[in-house]
Image (tube, coloured by chain):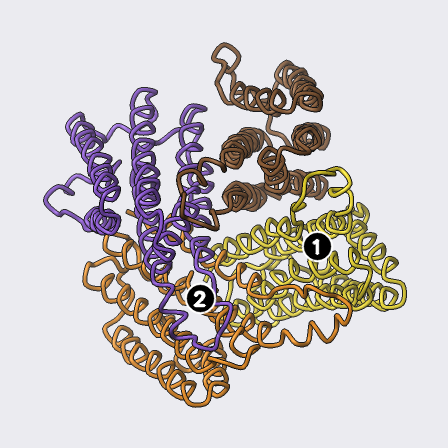
Chain colours: A yellow, B orange, C purple, D brown
Amino acid sequence: MPTSRLEAFSDGVFAIAITLLIFGIQAPAHTDHLLAALLALWPSYLGYVLSFLLIGLLWANHHVMFEHIERTDRGLMFLNTILLLVVAFLPFATTVLASTFRTGAGENTAVVLYGIVMVLAVLLFNAIWRHARRAGLMDGHVTEAGFRRMNRRILFGPLMYGVGAVAGYFIPWLGVVLYLGLILFYWLPIPQRNTAGEVVGTR
Amino acid sequence: MPTSRLEAFSDGVFAIAITLLIFGIQAPAHTDHLLAALLALWPSYLGYVLSFLLIGLLWANHHVMFEHIERTDRGLMFLNTILLLVVAFLPFATTVLASTFRTGAGENTAVVLYGIVMVLAVLLFNAIWRHARRAGLMDGHVTEAGFRRMNRRILFGPLMYGVGAVAGYFIPWLGVVLYLGLILFYWLPIPQRNTAGEVVGTR
Amino acid sequence: MPTSRLEAFSDGVFAIAITLLIFGIQAPAHTDHLLAALLALWPSYLGYVLSFLLIGLLWANHHVMFEHIERTDRGLMFLNTILLLVVAFLPFATTVLASTFRTGAGENTAVVLYGIVMVLAVLLFNAIWRHARRAGLMDGHVTEAGFRRMNRRILFGPLMYGVGAVAGYFIPWLGVVLYLGLILFYWLPIPQRNTAGEVVGTR
Amino acid sequence: MPTSRLEAFSDGVFAIAITLLIFGIQAPAHTDHLLAALLALWPSYLGYVLSFLLIGLLWANHHVMFEHIERTDRGLMFLNTILLLVVAFLPFATTVLASTFRTGAGENTAVVLYGIVMVLAVLLFNAIWRHARRAGLMDGHVTEAGFRRMNRRILFGPLMYGVGAVAGYFIPWLGVVLYLGLILFYWLPIPQRNTAGEVVGTR
């Protein structure tokens, strides 16, 4: 089976999840001191930007990964569904995160929850990649070296997000800064490693 | 008429319905005891996972079924619209189901409602399949044996979901366990029956 | 410019508008007498079914119409945007309609509002069709006879919905019955007229 | 990498953002004096129409621009994600704008906020266009003259929206009228300039 409808379905879920993030920002109920009311929503804007960049990154990775996967089977569809389940959970985790920074209570729990969702997402990318390799669903252009390089990244990505989660448990804002830094770092292209188009998975 | 836009439209509805499930989980209003508040939402997480796997499965079946359907007519578009109507109803049934397990009242009604929606979805897959056969919209590769094998499954699927609904009327949590078990069972590939790619419909 | 992305964008809006209809049905706040609470929501279910069939029908018509339109220009994109604006308004009109039948006040206003939205949608189909003809965006297979036959339908469609709206102003439930009857009538294929595949527009 | 999935993903976000605008209009809680209650929502309808035309226009521009961009790289995907972040923010800005005109307080702040979002969107179109040019992602048909003509427009667009925002700070309704006028102006085709299909960017 070709992957075209799986990609279309996944694109749909990514696009909807990313757009629904805006519902995490509630318009002020009173508009008397609108500027102040809008500024007080800063944790929501931060959460919106953070999760938008994250889901956009996950989509870009999905895009790149499926450039290398040519066929789909039932196992791949199942793993992809679990990945989408985790991605679609992000708007909830974002709303919780922003609400704790507004109320000033529970930030550490919310930062850890957010980190867990990120780690799960990257682990599922890993599982999809390994399954596609094992089940022979990839095209012939992925070399052994490219596969192993990707494996190193796969250990590196969740590890870093995990470090962010642990740091965030003790100093919540540090966790958020680390998440944002990691997402931006993963967005930036690293030219010298990108040569063969083999960069997939956690990137 | 080719089926490409019908598939694109259906993919859209499946993708949106599956992503909207997250709105069935309301972020805690108070974040003072956030971990406890998050844990108390377990019925919502369970409903989210259950319905995500179910809609993902229905999408996968739709995908496989339309690999065999080559053309569309007005009748097929109507039946497909009714199927989507039932699929798009699932987020509501999920919210109701989760809310009863949180409040501890009305679980049996909610489990039966959920089961009815599942049975309707499978019956509509059946109707689409039969209509496509009758109206000559399928490609030539579906054998008589493959068609009959699918028919047996079509009787089996709603029967099992119906058993889950009846069990759930008396013991609600048993109904949910049965639903989850059936969905996972239908997700798993059964290699010895999958040989000719003829597995469609209720699977 | 080809019409592929315009169709993809429109499919997206139709798919989202149709799936968002479920948010017009609010899960009962209390689950003590769940069955009674669920049954009391019947106007919402009716509105859901009515609008689902309507948006599905409008999508099917859009699908058929753009089988005949080959190229797009700025005017077509603008008219299509206005059509989508009207389609995306339907979830709101549906929620208002269902709420009046639940509260028992304002039904006539709500039925008329719903009828106006329907008439606007059909008129916009008309405008798109005429613009495509005038600007030479159609393929060569639409005959003069087919174009005129469609024109008769275009007068017939809004007229009938308008009759439903007027009837609904005096007897609200009659208006809803007429809408539902018309939508089902337009869904049913009329074999003797469908011969050349020229049925487009209001159908 | 080809741009097809980037276009599909962007189409999804545009389609969802535009359809979600309807949630900015809340159905009246009481239906006793429904017509009056519906008429009192006029600022919400105005915001709905304004933002629907704006997002539709931005989508149309995106469509035209990517007719000229043939390949994508990581930088283009990042800039496109930021553009979508701004587009998906519009339903929030619209809800805020409409609520201030209903309550009669904070209109100037809301008009300026809306204008800032518009200016950001156009600047991001500019950034995408320049990046595609610099990174050699465009097809060969865009001439130097076409590129420079587009550059003049790029300065003109944000400038005009900025003028609208400044005017709106002092006279809010004037700002809204200017926005609507500019959006309609940009929707209308200007035949004598459209000859080579080079009109992209701010249009």
How far apart, in angstroms, are the residues tagged by discs 2 and 1? Answer: 40 Å
Indicate whether C124 appears above or below B39.
above
Q: Nearer the viewer, residue D62 or D181?
A: D181
- Extreme-top residue of the structure: D192
Q: Nearer the viewer, residue D151 or A85?
A: A85
- Extreme-front residue of the structure: D32
Q: Chain of mark 1?
A: A
Image-quadrant location for residue B34: bottom right
Indicate left or right for B139 with D32 as reference.
left
Q: Which residue is mark 2?
A: B90
Element at label 2: helix
- Label 2: how many Cα within 10 Å (few below 14, some 14–19, many 20+): many
Image-quadrant location for residue C200: top left
The residue type indicated by label 2 comes to Leu
Q: Which residue is mark 1?
A: A198
Residue D104: % across, % down: 62, 33
Q: In the picture, which quadrant includes the C terminus of chain A?
A: bottom right
Indicate left or right for D67 with A30 as reference.
left
Q: Is residue D167 visible?
A: yes
Residue B26: % across, % down: 61, 64
